[in-house]
Amino acid sequence: MERKKCRLLEIVQYTCEPEELPSGEVRPRCFPLPRIFRICPDRPAVEITKLLKIDLKTGEIKMPDESSDVLPKGKYWRDIRRYDLEAEVGSSN
C-alpha cells in the first residue's frame, strides 16, 4: 500500500497597529506574519512555523529531521471545545 505524503501549506496573516502621521492622521501599519502548517492525509493540520529553519534570503524551508518527534498533537475542528467565561460568570449570579 502506498503511503500518502504530507505537504506544507503557508498562509500569511497580518498584525496591525495604529501609526500617527506627522499630519496628525492615524492609519494602520501592518506587518506580515507567515504561518506554515503540515497537512497529512486523515490527520488534523498542525502549525510548524516555530520548528522550521527559513532562509529569509532564498525562502528555502528546512524541517529538522527530529521534527516528527516534537510536533504538537493536532485536533479536528469538530473536537475543539470553547470554554465560555461569560456563561460561567453569568451563571454564578
Image: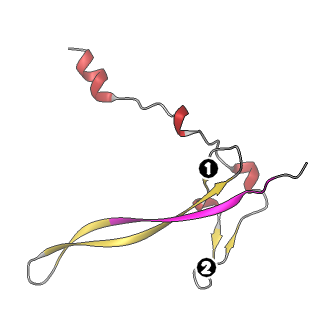
Q: Secondary structure at mark 2?
A: loop
Q: Residue furthest right?
A: 1
Q: Name the magenta segment's main secondary structure.
A: strand
Which corner quadrant of the image does residue 33 belong to?
bottom left
Q: Find the distance from the CA under tag 2 to the CA under tag 1.
A: 22 Å
* Residue 1 or residue 79, whichever sits in front: 1
Q: Residue 44 in the image: x percent, y percent?
A: 63, 45
Residue at 74% across / 63% down in the picture? 64
- Give yes or no for residue 5 being in the magenta stretch: yes
The tag earlier along the polypeptide, 2 or 1, is 1
Do the residues under discs 2 and 1 have CB atoms within 8 angstroms? no
Residue at 25% across / 15% down in the picture? 92
Q: Which residue is mark 1?
A: 45
| 91 relative to 51 in the view: left or right | left
User: Magenta segment, which residues?
Assistant: 4-15
Residue at 35% across / 64% down in the picture? 15
Q: Residue 5 in the image: x percent, y percent?
A: 78, 57
Q: Residue 51 in the image: x percent, y percent?
A: 64, 60
Q: Secondary structure at mark 1?
A: loop
Q: What numbered label is drawn on residue 12? A: none
* Residue 2 or residue 83, whichever sits in front: 2
Which corner quadrant of the image does residue 37 belong to?
bottom right
85 vs 22: above or below: above
Task: Give the amino acid at mark 2.
Answer: Gly
Q: Which residue is mark 2?
A: 59
77 vs 67: above or below: above
